[in-house]
Image (cartoon, rainbow, N blue to C red):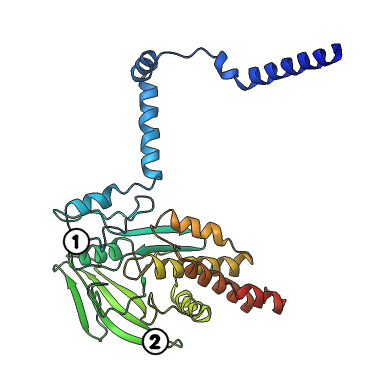
Amino acid sequence: MGIGMHEESLILVERATVQSALSAQKLVNGESVRDFTSNYISGKGLKRAMKLEHKFLWKQQRHISDFCRSEAMDEGKNRSPNVVNFNEGAVRLLPTVMNDSRYIHASQINIPYGNFIIAQGPTKQSLIDFFRMLWQCHVLLVICLEPLTNRKTCYPYFSFKKQQAVEARERISLETREVIETPVANLFVYEAVLTNMEIKSGANKRRIHIMRYDKWTHEKTISPVLLIKMITVMEAMDERKRKPIVVHGSYGIRRTAVFVITSLLIRQIAETHRMSILKAAVAIRRRRYGVLRFLADYRLILQSALCYAKQCDLIKNEKTFMDAIDVS
């Protein structure tokens, strides 16, 4: 009985010691809310630090203030009120005339394996902003994943015919000069000239290429092999490598994100023989709303990456490859 009481007292002492260790913060004398507020506000250094911290948080977080402001003004620049545009990674335009907006429904991701702008297909009201983005961001290549047969899904911003131009408010125009066929069926490249009529003297023209594929829809997806071929054509055209490539569909969510993430992975595999599919997906999701909501989209990315790795002879075991590619 005596031994039992001794053991019980030891247990109580141990519990008290643990509780004391876990509650060490209770030994710190806090200050009242009034004193804390007074000291924080009166200290200029602390006040400045607080403002800098808040400014940093504002820039880092996925606020949608500009998107909401655009919706409230009913500018017609957003294709849907349900597809938000995060502030994080958002493209900001430079105003050049009165009443120019800084806002456009587009997000940029610039990492070692690719520099992309993921954009919503332009609306009639945002056409001028789309052209301003092409000019100000020095875009030389646009990937169009829309058929451009319905103005409600994407306003036509270039012509399929040579020597025809699309103009926005007599400020910027895009004239098609050549139509180039590619080895990939239904994939066409349009060589065009972007002209900034606001520039009265000096270089106001740039050559730009538009790569368009019109058979990839939400109802009918494409094969991993075809996606790899499209990306291969894009890589061959991306001469300067670090200039941003604009990729758009209608809303700039599903096909666009699949194309961009797969492109990042393909370049990573080619350069390092490794791939970070989750990191790439997270990087895009932090900047673009609604990416990879569907398993089919993730499956297409994974299958395409594995197919490319197989083409590079990085996958030796045929059975392992076939088991991996048949993702259910």
Does residue 151 sit above or below 75 in this rendering? below
Does residue 220 sit above or below 99 in this rendering? below
In the image, residue 274 lies at what x, y percent?
A: 63, 64
Q: Nearer the viewer, residue 135 or 158?
A: 158
In the image, residue 11 lies at what x, y percent?
A: 75, 18
The residue lying at 33 percent from left, 61 percent from top is 137
Q: Are marks 1 and 2 in contact (CB under 8 Å)?
A: no
Q: Callout 2: helix, strand or loop?
A: loop
Does residue 102 sit above or below 237 in this rendering? above
Q: Amino acid at mark 1?
A: Gly
Residue 118 position by quadrant = bottom left
The residue lying at 26 percent from left, 65 percent from top is 130
Which corner quadrant holds the N terminus? top right
Q: Callout 1: helix, strand or loop?
A: loop
Residue 166 position by quadrant = bottom left
The residue lying at 36 percent from left, 27 percent from top is 48
Q: Amino acid at mark 2?
A: Asn
Q: Which residue is mark 1?
A: 76
Nearer the N terminus, badge 1 or badge 2?
A: 1
Q: Which residue is mark 2?
A: 186
